[in-house]
Amino acid sequence: MPQRIGKALAYAIVIWIIGFVWGSIVFMTPSLKSVRPIPYISNNPAISFPILIVWLPVTYLLAKNYLKASSDRMAEGLKLGLAFSLVNLILDLVILVLLLKAGFAYFISLTVWLGYLLLLIVPWLTGRSMHTNLR
């Protein structure tokens, strides 16, 4: 069991790093950095929308890999999704909001919460799909 928890946390960190690296690239590219915000939807659409698009297949593939060794895939998928969301929320809070001083206004953006929801639901739906395919 501890090995599986470590694997889930490692996958969650990989997902977060993908977003962080893309955000760093955007902030180093003047034309991307200057994209106008969409109030309450996205503080930086050049970061948030590509991340949401990339996270979808990455989350699915990581969840599928993680869940293939599980017997109760639906329940494990929900736990994995919860781990993905919580780890990303905590890393966003600690690194982006506190250390990089993005401020708590970071969490006003709808795309941020959509990302957390995506990280919660995709592993659960993946586990559900894999569970029904066993029957």
Image (tube, helix red, strand yellow):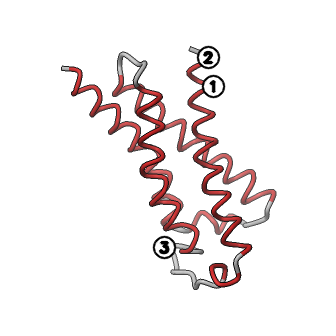
Q: Residues within 10 Å of mark 3 (few under 14, many from 20)?
A: some
Q: Quadrant of residue 99?
A: bottom right
Q: Secondary structure at mark 2?
A: helix
Q: How many marks?
A: 3
Which label number is shown at residue 62?
none
Q: Mark 1 falls on what kind of element?
A: helix
Left/right placement of residue 35 relative to residue 118 reads right
Residue at horizontal 54 percent and vertical 66 percent from the top: 48
Q: Which residue is mark 3?
A: 41
Residue 26 versus residue 93 in the image, above or below: below
Q: Which residue is mark 1?
A: 6
Residue 56 percent across, percent down from the top left: 43, 52
Crowding at dot 2, Cα within 10 Å, few <14 / some 14-19 / many 20+, comes out as few
Relative to 135, 29 lies left or right: right
- Determine the image quadrant of residue 25: bottom right
Of mark 1 and mark 3, the one earlier in the sequence is 1
Identified by mark 3, the residue type is Ile
List the residue tagged with mark 2: 2
Using the numbered discs, state the Cα–Cα distance from disc 1 to disc 2 in whole angstroms: 6 Å
Residue type at mark 1 is Gly
Residue at left offset 64%, top offset 41%: 13
The x and y percentages for residue 97 are: 73, 60
Distance between mark 2 and mark 3 Cα atoms: 38 Å
Counting from the top left corner in percent of width and height, residue 135 is at: 18, 20
**Could you say which is closer to the camera, residue 27 or residue 82?**
27
Eye-nearest disc, 2 or 3: 2
Amino acid found under the numbered disc labelled 2: Pro
Residue drawn 27% across and 34% down?
A: 129
Query: Marks 1 and 2: CB-CB under 8 Å?
Result: yes
Residue at the spot 49% in from the left edge and 37% down from the top edge: 82
